[in-house]
Image (cartoon, rainbow, N blue to C red):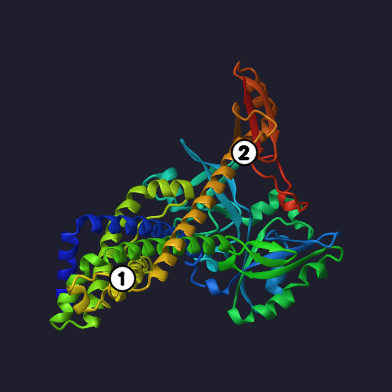
Amino acid sequence: MLQNYFLIAWRNLLRHKGYAFINILGLTVGLAANVFILLWVTDELSFDQFHANGDRIFQVLVNSEYPDGSIETYAATPAKLKAVIESQIPEVELATQYSMETELLVKHESNAFNESGIYADPALFEVFSFPIVSGDPTQPLTDIQSIAISENLAKKLFEKEDPIGKTLRLGESSELMVTSVFENIPQNSSLQFDFVVPFEAFVKENPWTQNWRSGGSKTAVMLKSADSRDAADQKLSGLIKSNCADCSTTPLLFPYLKSRLYSEFENGKNTGGRIQQVFLFGAVAILILVMACINFMNLSTARSANRSREVGVRKSIGAKKTDLVIQFMTESVLLSFIALLFALGIVQMLLPFFNEITAKSIELDFTSPVFTFGILGVAAICGLLAGSYPAFVLSAFHPAKVLKGNTQAGLTGNTLRKTLVVVQFSTSLILIIGSITVYKQIVFIGERNLGFDKENIIVVDRNEGTDKNYSAIKNDLNQLAAVKSIAFGGNNIFTVPITTTDPVWAGKPDNSSITFK
């Protein structure tokens, strides 16, 4: 019977090619937009979920109280905090500390690359799921002169050679030996790095981190049980003030798996973050899907007169209303899945552009059950939702009346159809106005007068070499006829500066700008 339903549905589509084309086009656009949003939302929700002990990992945040009563929350913790946590909080199984990501020149023989890395203790690889693929997994960092590198960096520096035991140069002076190689960090990891240097080296280079008032590191802990968070949090809250009477900072635990999507705090309370964008895009996806379904409903009911006699004949020879409902629903589901195939083709074609504007590396992964069942579910829901109203309307025709030529007999629900049209146009106007507003804001930001001519300015990231040879580099650049002036600064002038008095953000200037004539 089911095969017969699909056969009749297919024949109807072939018989009414124009109608089928318009419906498929509308559903294709709606489904393509939904697939793009589904890919983006799925990628955002997948961040950091690969950690095996993710439910037990907590980021140590700090609430810093200011004289005006305001509270600022950030992840910069004193470097001494880790040792105190391990000794005084029995609920903690492991603790690790690591620096902010830093970009340094990594060189081996003639191969040299600017790579992003961190300073961390060996426990980093136990708390987080960053597997060691070469070297001793129990001792990924053996001493202060060791370094762990990613598979990508190992391939770039050493090509086909075994990197273990080899020496490389980090920055201008540090000679380090590769003691381990770890798997490439997944794209959906909040923490991104290609090398890890022992945290002791960071403390040695930055003695100011030994002050309890500093915020020179990030700290993460893995609890013995996720249920012990409250007990650990209570003991953690007074650790800084008990070691620094005049400090105004209070540490707290925050689930690491939420650190990306729930990163915004106001006066010490979490207020959301990127999760609001996830909800917003999810709502937009639902609106687009509903509009596509309403378009299908209106087209189906508009041509109901053309199928009234078909319904009359089938009912007169014994067809039940249930059979007709299933038949019409089958047609809409078939249309929806055909539209899904075209939508996936459009998504595959536009995916590189989508990745460019979203700064992601998303792919169509049909091996992922979440993605596969997600798009199939969206297509099925779209087909059922779009075909439900037309199916019940068409199946309600009275055979005696329609066979006599009264095609309007049984065509009820005018109020609902008019309402659907109003909803469709209203939603379209809302989305169009919203898109125009966003576009104008982007244009305004791009064309806003910043108080200087940015057309002839380039910004170059600084490193250890430029810091040490600042005068010589500036003098050489000034000799170039094309260079008008040079300035060194601590932040990129084209970005919003961070306003804080915490020492973690204080340091050497990291950008230089060159103005051309």
Residue at 19% over, 62% down: 13
Q: Earlier in the sequence, mark 2 or mark 1?
A: 1
Callout 2 amino acid: Asn
**Label drawn at residue 345:** none
**What residue is shown at x 34% (from left), y 74% (from top)?**
412
Q: Is residue 179 visible?
A: no
Report if residue 483 is visible in the image.
yes
At label 1, which amino acid type do we have?
Pro
Looking at the picture, how far across and down is residue 266, in whole percent?
72, 63
Q: Is residue 53 above or below residue 77?
A: below
Q: Which mark is residue 390?
A: 1
Q: Which labelled disc corresponds to residue 463?
A: 2
Residue 443 to residue 219: above or below: above
**C-alpha span from label 2 to label 1:** 66 Å
For label 2, count other residues whose C-alpha is less than 10 Å away and answer few (under 14), some (14-19) or many (20+): some
Q: Position of residue 428 (x, y in %)?
A: 46, 56
Structural crowding at the residue carrying mark 1, measured as other residues with C-alpha within 10 Å and reported as few (<14), some (14–19) or many (≥20): many
* Quadrant (top left/top right/bottom left/bottom right) for the C terminus: top right
Give the quarter of the image for residue 364: bottom left
Residue 456, horizontal then vertical, whole percent:
60, 26
